[in-house]
Image (spheres, grey):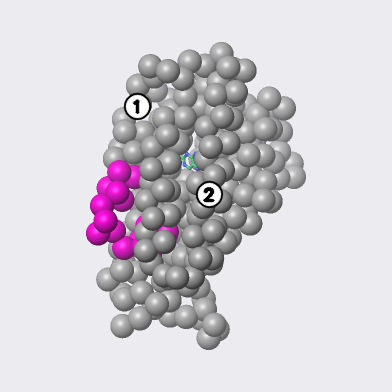
Amino acid sequence: MEGAGSGDGVKPRTATWLDKHRPMYDRATRHPFIRSIRDGAVDFASFKRWLAQDYIFVKEFVPFVASVLLNSCRQSDDTSDMEIILGGVASLSDELSWFKTEASRWDVELTGVSPLKANIEYCRFLESFSSAEIDYTVAITTFWAIETVYQDSFSFCIQSGSKTPKELLGTCQRWGSDEFKQYCQSLQKIVDRCLEKAPIDVVEKAEEAFVRVLEHEFDFWNMSSSEH
Ligand SMILES: Cc1ncc(CN)c(N)n1
């Protein structure tokens, strides 16, 4: 059986999941660490821990996104997905440079830092996508979810009423910008299109991956705000 379509007045699958898993989604995107940035009370030691740990994560994220790109190239002759994902790969080069610049600004050492438990577990989850057996729909769903949690979290820190410290505005802009939002929306459209055509077992696996991302993101914020 195939999934419900978006062109027939039926809610797109991702919107259904965002409703169904709203408490978990809010836990991931409105975490106390994010709220503390928004209300200006952030502990800078936590921010620095996040910075060093996220650099490690992004280095692992590169092969993950590359595997999604490869998967999309094998998928079809239509190059539109590939072009969007390729844009994501390209922006990771900028992102890694940004981490290095930001780390030196904050006097944060990036080399020789050990990943903390939640980071190790999240990176292990990413690694599990390197297998050629992974369904494109599940991989692209995971990619969309990872990017969207950051987009939603950091845009919350620059929305009206926020008291984000000026030193952190650049960080929040990086993922909270309209440009990044549009990119996430392009990924979401790909995901919904794939889910419409996917058999039910693939839809279930993709939903499971979506929930796993929310859990990992929540744990990642926890790890950043306290040393565990
Ligand atoms: C943990 C985490 N999640 C998402 C992103 C956004 N690429 C990130 N840099 N780090």
User: Where's residue 104, x and y in %?
Assistant: 58, 17
Number of callouts in the render? Answer: 2
Q: Residues within 10 Å of mark 2 (few under 14, many from 20)?
A: many
SS label for mark 1: loop
Question: On the image, numbered disc 1 is attached to which residue?
Answer: 116
Q: Residue at x 56, y 51 (%)?
A: 87
Going by the numbered disc 1, the residue's amino acid type is Leu
SS majority, magenta: helix
- Give the distance between the C-alpha atoms of the residues marked 2 and 1, in whole angstroms: 26 Å
Q: Residues within 10 Å of mark 1 (few under 14, many from 20)?
A: some
Going by the numbered disc 2, the residue's amino acid type is Gly
The mark that comes first in sequence, 2 or 1, is 2
**Looking at the rendering, in which quadrant would you find the C terminus?**
top left
Residues 112 and 164: in front is: 112
Closer to the camera: disc 2 or disc 1? 2
Q: Residue at x 45, y 36 (%)?
A: 58
Q: Is residue 131 magenta?
A: yes
| Vertical arrangement, residue 36 with respect to residue 8, above or below | above
User: Where's residue 106, x and y in %?
Assistant: 59, 17
Question: On the image, numbered disc 2 is attached to which residue?
Answer: 88
Query: Which residue is the extreme one toward the front?
Result: 77
- Give the residues drawn in magenta, as a range: 125-142
Q: Residue at x 31, y 75 (%)?
A: 200
User: Where's residue 170, x and y in %?
Assistant: 67, 32
Quick check: can you spot residue 88?
yes
Residues 44 and 119: in front is: 119
Q: Is mark 2 within 8 Å of ligand 1?
A: no
Q: Is residue 22 magenta?
A: no
Residues 143 and 70: in front is: 70
Quick check: can you spot residue 207?
no
SS label for mark 2: helix
Q: Is mark 1 within 8 Å of ligand 1?
A: no
